Image (cartoon, rainbow, N blue to C red):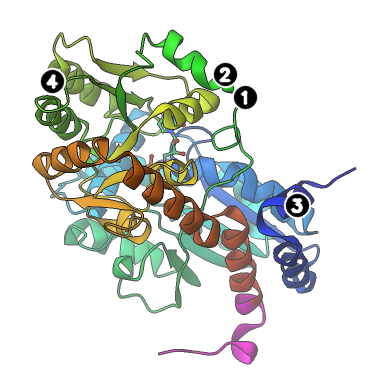
Amino acid sequence: MTSLLETYAAITGNDVIDHLRQLAKPLANMKVVHVNSTRVGGGVAEILEKLVPLTNELGIDAKWEIISGEADFYECTKSMHNALQGNRENISPELLQSYEQTNIANAEKLRPVLEDADFVFIHDPQPAALINHCPNRHGKWIWRCHIDASHPYRPVWKYLQNIVSHYDASIFSLPAFAQPLQHPQYIIPPSIDPLSDKNIDLPPEEASQVYRDFALDPDRHLIVQVSRYDRFKDPVGVIRAYRLAKRFVPDLQLVLAGGSATDDPEGEIVVREVREAAGSDPDIHVLLLPPDAHRTINALQRAADIVLQKSTKEGFGLTVTEAMWKSKPVIGGDTGGIRLQVVNYHTGFLVHTPEGAALRIRYLLHQQQMRAQIGERAKNYVRENFLLTRHLREHLTLLVGLHYESRYRIKLS
Ligand code: UDP
């Protein structure tokens, strides 16, 4: 039977898989636990879904645990998230208490597995305080920040920094996001899984089914943004860009496709704002998709002439990677992780405003050959830099480095 790992060889080549096996050897049977706050919705869940089974296949004992809490907890962690991305958020003592209490309650449940692990990856602020309640931990704890923390709101960062300083290491997606911390910091950008339902090639009839499902016209231009309904993703700015572009390209349709992550309490409010902005325009399709609509999102991204990700802050933007992997030109906000992926004029376009996005939409829709060229370069760029196998390789390298301490580590600073 072909192993999961071997199925990736068809895309990456055998050497990549052999390299992973080699790196995993010194970590055989070690226990790794990942903890985040949702199993579905959002980029972290998307990554862990495959990273964990692949780590297991390499002979490492990897687990994925989630923490859960009440509405107050998610309100607090959403504020932390927004504050790390630069918003001024004054979080009340009551909400902070709910944060602490939720971490204590979850530590009660998870303590045996966390204290027993050789490596614990804690993703984002939600479960960060677990470390304070696992006094007998013996492994290395790594805080993995997926957020654009380049200019955090200081009071909230100070609070989190107190917690994060207990970790053995942290990981950020871009050098610009790293923060003053006493422990080693690693830069590891996220990745997509080319064999997941979200990214795999679809049979033509399934790909075209989305036109019927959402009453889209296959003979007209289609622009798509896939995102949680979150203001940092600027869905209202996308509507504005569409309207500006439509003055010059009348046969234009827009799909905004999103759902909400279970740990994101703001989604409903933002959906209302988006619906209001869309008004009664029959060519704007605001879709609320269930969390497992991976193949539908795949088909929408493939159906698009152009994919937008007009975020004003973006930790990485897996939706950008997903679209680029499907050879789509992406028009992205000039921010955070989008900059890492969209090389302006080469693998897509970076923009600052709805006006800028509209200009690029117009330009690309009139330049079919350019769309195809950019799309091809985008796909190659993802193949070389942002596939799961590279991500796994960097995780393994980090674990080997942490486990064997400084004996084999070359310090660059
Ligand atoms: N996604 C999804 N359904 C939705 C909206 C988003 O499955 O309704 C997926 C999207 O395809 C991507 C991930 O969730 O894989 C979002 O990751 P990204 O890094 O773009 O943003 P985040 O939500 O983590 O801020």
Q: Amino acid at mark 1?
A: Pro
- Is residue 73 in view from this perspective? yes
For the residue pair 223 and 413, the one nearer the viewer reads as: 223
Q: Alpha carbon of mark 4 to alpha carbon of mark 3: how far?
A: 45 Å
Q: Alpha carbon of mark 2 to alpha carbon of mark 3: how far?
A: 26 Å
Q: How many marks?
A: 4
Q: Alpha carbon of mark 1 to alpha carbon of mark 3: how far?
A: 23 Å
Mark closest to the chain's N terminus, 4 or 3:
3
Q: Residue at x 34, y 28 (%)?
A: 71
Secondary element under disc 2, as helix, strand or loop, is: helix
- Is residue 329 in view from this perspective? no
The correct choice, above or below, for 229 with respect to 59 in the image is above
Mark closest to the chain's N terminus, 2 or 3:
3
Q: Which residue is mark 4?
A: 277
> Which range of residues does the magenta coloring cover?
401-413
Q: Give me the disc on residue 203.
A: 1
If the picture is divided into quarters, which one holds ligand 1?
top left
Q: Which residue is mark 3?
A: 5
**137 displayed left or right of 31:** left
Can you give x and y, in whole percent of width and height, for residue 7 in the image?
Answer: 75, 47
Q: Alpha carbon of mark 1 to alpha carbon of mark 4: how far?
A: 35 Å
Q: Are marks 2 and 4 in contact (CB under 8 Å)?
A: no
Can you give x and y, in whole percent of width and height, for residue 143 in the image?
Answer: 46, 61
Q: Alpha carbon of mark 2 to alpha carbon of mark 4: how far?
A: 31 Å
Q: Residue at x 58, y 87 (%)?
A: 409
Q: Amino acid at mark 3?
A: Leu
